[in-house]
Image (cartoon, helix red, strand yellow):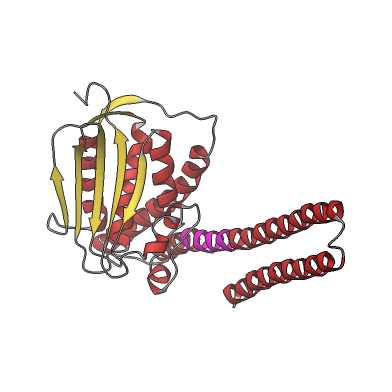
């Protein structure tokens, strides 16, 4: 219902802008026909009409952007509410059970494991928010150091396999030669981990992910994360990297998240003079995410 209301608001402001421009043009044309001999007034009228049309267009554009931005903020708040409330409720439930009942050692260990997993999920959501704020601050510069991107990707793959309980066949990693880059290890690790986690989330039950890290064109180190999941429509390929943006549809409703993961990926890439982009043939055909960094001078030799 809320989404429908916002669509109606956008349609209203667009229609209002088009209507105002149409009225201005009709009035101007009528004025010209009645005053065709007065050249100076004609010139001033052209300027006035251009100013009016520009003002209406800018005003309509601003209003539509604000409506969409508010919609994204509301979606982010709803997603974060779920991401924070769900693990807290789970932790409370299992803690109360441990306190109120006498359980076997195996059951107690199981409940403690669930509590720890929910704590990790909670901390992960909080870290996403904090990292977004740090990356958006122009005063905080990356802590650059020479590092091997291949080792960092290996670490992220091992973590993802353990966290999501995936086999080596479900998440294939083609480990190549060392890739030396000049980067902030913490930021790059977060970017790579976000790409892999995102691929797992949108793979559904049949997970088939391929991760590669190799040098290309003699100048770049590229991390590719390819999945066989839900895929992405062509118009969405650039939008998905916006802050708070989430792809619509049933798949997005199934997959929970903050809408910050891919924004963090692109922000990290840009802070390191790199790039991040996505490729997909369309919905249902899987997708590939590429994270690119310039090789350091020693690594490019």
Task: Indicate whether residue 74 is drawn in magenta.
Answer: yes
In the rendered image, residue 58, in percent from the top left (x then y), is placed at 69, 56
Task: Indicate whether residue 153 is drawn in magenta.
Answer: no
Q: What residue lies at 30% left-to-right and 60% top-to-bottom?
A: 280
Residue furthest front in the image? 37
In the rendered image, residue 126, in percent from the top left (x then y), is placed at 47, 48
Residues 160 and 173: in front is 173
Number of numbered tags placed on the structure image: 0
Choose top left, top right, bottom left or bottom right for residue 257: bottom left
SS majority, magenta: helix
Q: What residue lies at 83% left-to-right and 62% top-to-bottom?
A: 36
Whether residue 200 is situated above or below residue 154 in the rendered picture: below
Q: What residue lies at 33% left-to-right and 24% top-to-bottom?
A: 145
Q: Provide the residue span drawn in magenta.
A: 71-83
Residues 139 and 296: in front is 296
In the rendered image, residue 87, in percent from the top left (x then y), is placed at 43, 60
Residues 16 and 259: in front is 16
Q: What residue lies at 47% left-to-right and 42% top-to-bottom?
A: 131
In the rendered image, residue 301, in percent from the top left (x then y), is placed at 18, 23
* 84 sits left or right of 290 in the view: right
């Amino acid at each position: 219902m809320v989404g429908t209301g916002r669509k109606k608001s956008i349609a209203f402001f667009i229609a209002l802008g088009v209507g105002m421009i149409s009225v201005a043009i009709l009035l101007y044309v009528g004025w010209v026909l009645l005053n065709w001999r007065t050249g100076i007034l004609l010139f001033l009228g052209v300027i006035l009409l251009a100013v009016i049309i520009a003002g209406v267009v800018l005003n309509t554009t601003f209003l539509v952007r604000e409506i969409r931005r508010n919609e994204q903020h509301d979606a982010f708040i709803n997603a974060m509410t779920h991401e924070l409330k769900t693990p807290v409720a789970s932790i409370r439930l299992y803690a109360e059970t441990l306190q109120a009942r006498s359980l076997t050692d195996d059951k107690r260990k199981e409940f403690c494991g669930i509590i720890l997993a929910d704590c990790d999920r909670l901390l992960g959501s909080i870290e996403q928010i904090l990292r977004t704020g740090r990356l958006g601050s122009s005063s905080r510069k990356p802590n650059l150091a020479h590092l091997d991107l291949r080792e960092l990707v290996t670490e992220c793959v091992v973590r993802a396999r353990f966290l999501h309980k995936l086999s080596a066949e479900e998440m294939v990693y083609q480990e190549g030669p060392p890739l030396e880059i000049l980067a902030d290890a913490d930021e790059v690790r977060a970017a790579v981990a976000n790409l892999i986690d995102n691929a797992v989330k949108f793979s559904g039950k049949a997970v088939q992910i391929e991760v590669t890290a190799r040098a290309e064109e003699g100048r770049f180190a590229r991390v590719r994360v390819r999945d066989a999941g839900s895929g992405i429509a062509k118009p969405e390929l650039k939008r998905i990297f916006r802050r708070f943006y989430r792809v619509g549809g049933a798949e997005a409703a199934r997959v929970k998240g903050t809408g910050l993961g891919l924004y963090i990926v692109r922000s990290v890439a840009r802070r390191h003079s790199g790039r991040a982009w996505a490729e997909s043939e369309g919905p249902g055909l899987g997708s590939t995410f590429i994270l690119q960094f310039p090789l350091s001078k020693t690594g490019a030799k």
